[in-house]
């Protein structure tokens, strides 16, 4: 079953200018209604991001996360068939020349720049982040140490914003993308600098699909090409 969900909020809804909000959520495999959880997380994060009196982006991101977590818990209480559902989340906000993110779980955010790939966010897995921010190779799937399930969030990656450079590529994804190695990612993303963001996303999905792994997890990617 497809248990991923994603969303992109365009510049018009964020006040115009060079802004974008992108989200990827991965419903917890083997749990109740993972596809419901991921969709609700994306929907309610956006609601919480906008329905808050705070004007700074950091507070808006936290409002989105807390709203999504609260609503997941409420939905599970109201509908017994949804109890036990949960989701990861990576939410990425670009404004002017800065990128900031907030994430829970093991959905990665990659930065491709100058022939190198770097994972920006920390992954929340039992035993800790296996690569400590590196991508050589991408971190493999493991047991989640933190997820959005309607309870207290013990681990959240809320790192300081980073400055972007023209030509940077950002890839927010579910962990199914980890089928591809660092070399694979570079060949696809850095080998065709004139390719559009949409074409990069499609190329990544096709590369994962071509492996034809019997144990392949759902794979969702949002690619942003900056500048």
Image (cartoon, rainbow, N blue to C red):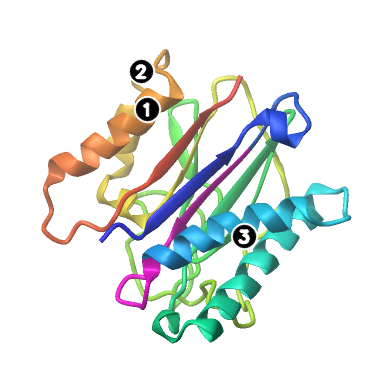
Q: Name the disc covering residue 192, or none.
A: 2
- Residue at 60 percent across and 82 percent down: it is 151
Does dot 2 land on a helix, a strand or a loop?
A: loop
- Residue at 63 percent across and 57 percent down: it is 45
Residue 71, given in percent of the width and then of the height, sits at 61, 72
Residue 140, given in percent of the width and then of the height, sits at 32, 61
- Residue at 71 percent across and 58 percent down: it is 48
On the rendered structure, is 84 left or right of 49?
A: left
Earlier along the polypeptide chain: callout 2 or callout 3?
Answer: 3
Q: Nearer the viewer, mark 1 or mark 3?
A: 3
Earlier along the polypeptide chain: callout 2 or callout 1?
Answer: 2
Does dot 3 land on a helix, a strand or a loop?
A: helix
Residue 176, given in percent of the width and then of the height, sits at 31, 54
Q: Is residue 149 magenta?
A: no
95 w.r.t. 208: above or below: above
113 w.r.t. 145: above or below: above
Number of labels in the image equals: 3
Does dot 1 land on a helix, a strand or a loop?
A: helix
Which quadrant holds the N terminus?
bottom left
Measured in 3D between alpha carbons, the distance from the residue under mark 1 to the one under mark 3, in whole angstroms, is 28 Å
Which quadrant holds the C terminus?
top right
- Quarter of the figure with residue 16: top right
Query: Can residue 98 be seen from the camera position used here?
Result: no
Stretch in magenta: 21-34
**Residue contact at pointers 1 and 3, CB within 8 angstroms:** no
**Residue contact at pointers 2 and 1, CB within 8 angstroms:** yes
194 w.r.t. 212: above or below: above
To which residue does mark 1 refer? Answer: 200
Q: Name the disc covering residue 44, or none.
A: 3
């Amino acid at each position: 079953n497809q248990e991923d969900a994603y969303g992109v909020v365009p510049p018009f809804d964020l006040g115009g200018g060079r802004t974008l909000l992108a989200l990827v959520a991965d419903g917890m495999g083997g749990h109740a209604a993972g596809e419901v959880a991921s969709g609700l997380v994306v929907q309610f994060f956006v609601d919480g991001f906008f329905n808050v009196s705070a004007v700074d982006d950091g507070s808006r991101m936290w409002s989105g996360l807390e709203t999504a977590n609260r609503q997941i818990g409420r939905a599970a209480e109201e509908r017994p068939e949804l109890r036990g559902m949960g989701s990861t989340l990576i939410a990425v906000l670009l404004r002017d020349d800065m990128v900031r993110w907030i994430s829970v779980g093991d959905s990665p955010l990659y930065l491709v720049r100058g022939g190198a790939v770097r994972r920006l966010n920390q992954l929340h897995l039992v035993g800790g982040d296996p690569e400590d921010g590196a991508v050589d190779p991408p971190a493999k799937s493991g047991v989640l140490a933190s997820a959005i399930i309607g309870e207290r969030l013990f681990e959240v990656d809320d790192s300081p914003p980073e400055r972007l450079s023209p030509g940077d590529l950002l890839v927010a994804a579910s962990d199914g993308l980890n089928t591809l190695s660092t070399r694979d990612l570079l060949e696809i993303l850095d080998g065709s600098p004139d390719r559009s963001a949409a074409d990069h996303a499609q190329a990544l999905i096709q590369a994962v699909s071509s492996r034809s792994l019997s144990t392949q997890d759902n794979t969702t990617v949002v690619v942003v090409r900056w500048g």
